[in-house]
Image (spheres, rainbow, N blue to C red):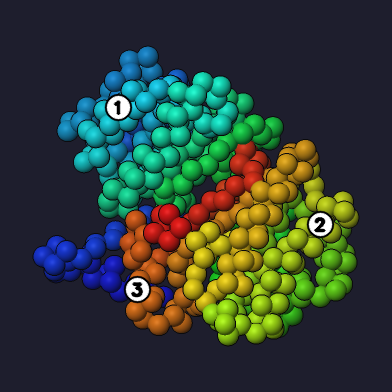
């Protein structure tokens, strides 16, 4: 459903009213549109340590406008605050900061450019994972980046976002894929996130269709977020297999026909679900998206056994059982990508959702526990944790609670199913095996669980 407050706040009258009484003025976010060719449409600024040399090598594939900040070695046009163009994207390499005194470089770099950001700008800070460093002082400095990046993300305005990527030396060849996502409108509703990139042997061959040649299974695919995921995976070149309950067969078949995929009507909690799934995937699978989920909300004092059991069975047990069956049955290909749809409720908890939060936290645990096992086969497993997403379910929430859910984030609005789908599609890419056993929150940097 539409967010009428954003429409009001972005009108000339609404801006005056909001400014006069101190109301928030969330920006309309720029999202990826069909036909777009470049991740960045505008100026990209590079600065900081040695990793920006790696970025400079492919920066012209991201945008035509690339500038450096106080770094003549990059052989790029210099950007000068107040004189240069508005910045659509910024990459700062902080991996060279090895003690707390050097952290002042963060202020020296970012302070001059904050008033020169274009609408819906995207910033990425690069670092080294603190736990990977032998020097305690360097580890302290790199850990400080998390506090800085999350705080600065909350200060940004006009739809801008910021992420921190800890880059293993062996993962530097996967920087392009990560920056193509986080510097583009595909990450419009993601901000304040911290991810670690590790070594990954596979690469994307065609950036216009990064999932070409890969077969993807999406559960709960008939409508809502599941349908958006299926559409996005198909857009990126994947052959899709769509699964949902038999009651949703009509919608499922229609979507599969439109996307040129196949439909599987199946109750994932049935005792024979694993056998039927393996029969439906005789050629195996490359991407598995466990999206199917239900809610049965009650405070624990009023929670019935039926409500508890149903949520845990669908949301948590079924993904475990089906993934194990795919592994045991040889259907999960090497270099496969598994994505689990968790929730920020599984990170922060939510009143009246003890069963749901437990199931979603369990999925995060599943990603962390199985990551080392899957890594041996070049495969990865990660969780995506959506925040407030505009769906039919959130449209049914009472007005006051719905408005609170929308505004309690740095971006001041709810996300769209497309935002979740873009994150899933990125994690499904061959090169995204560099991310494994982690949680990517698609929540606009929600206050809950921050």
Picture coordinates of residue 170, whole percent (x, y): 62, 26
**Separation (CA) of disc 1 from disc 3:** 38 Å
Instruction: Say whether disc 2 or disc 1 marks the residue closer to the N-terminus.
Output: 1
Residue 39's spot in the image, x, y percent? 45, 43
The residue at the far top in this view is 73
CA separation in Å, label 2 and label 3: 40 Å
The N terminus appears in which quarter of the rendering? bottom left
Position of the C terminus by quadrant: bottom left
Residue 320 visible in the snapshot = yes
Q: Looking at the image, is mark 1 or mark 3 nearer the viewer?
A: 1
Looking at the image, which residue is at 65% across and 41% down? 433
Q: Earlier in the sequence, mark 1 or mark 3?
A: 1
Badge 2 is on which residue? 324
**Is residue 288 found left or right of 439 in the rendered image?**
right
The answer to whether residue 255 of the structure is visible from this angle is no
* 156 and 61: which is toward the camera: 156
Q: Residue at x 84, y 59 (%)?
A: 325
* Left or right: residue 203 compared with residue 325: left
The dot on residue 104 is: 1
**Residue nearest the viewer, comparing 72 with 268:** 268
Q: Which of disc 3 and disc 2 is earlier in sequence?
A: 2
> For mark 3, what is the residue?
403
Instruction: For marks 2 and 1, give the one nearer the viewer.
Output: 1
Label 2 crowding class (10 Å Cα cut-off): few <14, some 14-19, many 20+?
some
Mark 1: give few (<14), some (14-19) or many (20+) Cα within 10 Å: few
Q: Is residue 252 above or below residue 371?
A: below
């Amino acid at each position: 459903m539409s967010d009428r407050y954003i429409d009001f706040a972005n009108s000339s009258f609404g801006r005056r009213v909001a400014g006069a009484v101190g109301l928030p003025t969330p920006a309309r976010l720029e999202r990826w549109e069909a036909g777009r060719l470049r991740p960045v449409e505008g100026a990209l600024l590079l600065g900081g340590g040695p990793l920006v040399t790696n970025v400079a090598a492919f920066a012209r594939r991201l945008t035509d406008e690339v500038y450096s900040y106080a770094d003549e070695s990059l052989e790029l046009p210099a950007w000068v605050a107040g004189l240069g163009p508005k910045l659509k994207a910024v990459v700062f390499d902080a991996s060279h900061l090895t003690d707390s005194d050097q952290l002042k470089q963060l202020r020296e770099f970012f302070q001059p450019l904050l008033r020169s950001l274009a609408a819906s700008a995207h910033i990425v800070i690069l670092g080294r994972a603190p736990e990977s460093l032998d020097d305690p002082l360097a580890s302290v400095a790199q850990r400080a980046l998390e506090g800085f990046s999350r705080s600065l993300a909350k200060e940004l305005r006009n739809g801008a976002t910021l992420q921190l990527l800890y880059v293993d030396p062996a993962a530097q060849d996967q920087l392009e894929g990560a920056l193509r996502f986080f510097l583009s409108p595909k990450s419009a509703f993601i901000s304040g996130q911290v991810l670690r990139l590790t070594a990954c042997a596979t690469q994307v061959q065609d950036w216009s269709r990064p999932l070409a040649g890969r077969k993807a299974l999406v559960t709960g695919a008939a409508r809502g977020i599941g349908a958006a995921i299926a559409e996005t995976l198909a857009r990126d070149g994947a052959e899709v297999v769509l699964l949902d309950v038999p009651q949703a067969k009509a919608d499922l078949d229609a979507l599969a026909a439109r996307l040129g995929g196949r439909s599987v009507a199946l109750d994932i909690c049935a005792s024979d679900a694993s056998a039927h799934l393996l029969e439906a995937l005789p050629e195996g699978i490359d991407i598995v998206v466990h999206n199917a989920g239900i809610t049965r909300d009650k405070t624990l004092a009023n929670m019935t056994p039926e409500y508890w059991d149903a949520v845990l069975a669908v949301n948590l047990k079924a993904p475990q059982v089906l993934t194990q069956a795919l592994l045991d049955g040889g259907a999960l290909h090497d270099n496969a990508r598994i994505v689990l749809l968790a929730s920020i409720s599984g990170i922060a908890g939510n009143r009246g959702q003890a069963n749901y939060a437990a199931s979603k936290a369990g999925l995060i645990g599943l990603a962390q526990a199985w990551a080392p096992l899957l890594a041996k086969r070049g495969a990865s497993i990660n969780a995506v944790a959506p925040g407030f997403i505009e769906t039919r379910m959130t449209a049914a929430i009472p007005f006051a609670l719905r408005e609170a859910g929308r505004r309690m984030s740095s971006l001041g609005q709810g996300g769209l199913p497309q935002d979740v789908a873009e994150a899933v599609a990125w994690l499904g890419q061959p090169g995204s095996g560099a991310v494994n056993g982690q949680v990517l929150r698609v929540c606009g940097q929600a206050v809950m669980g921050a």
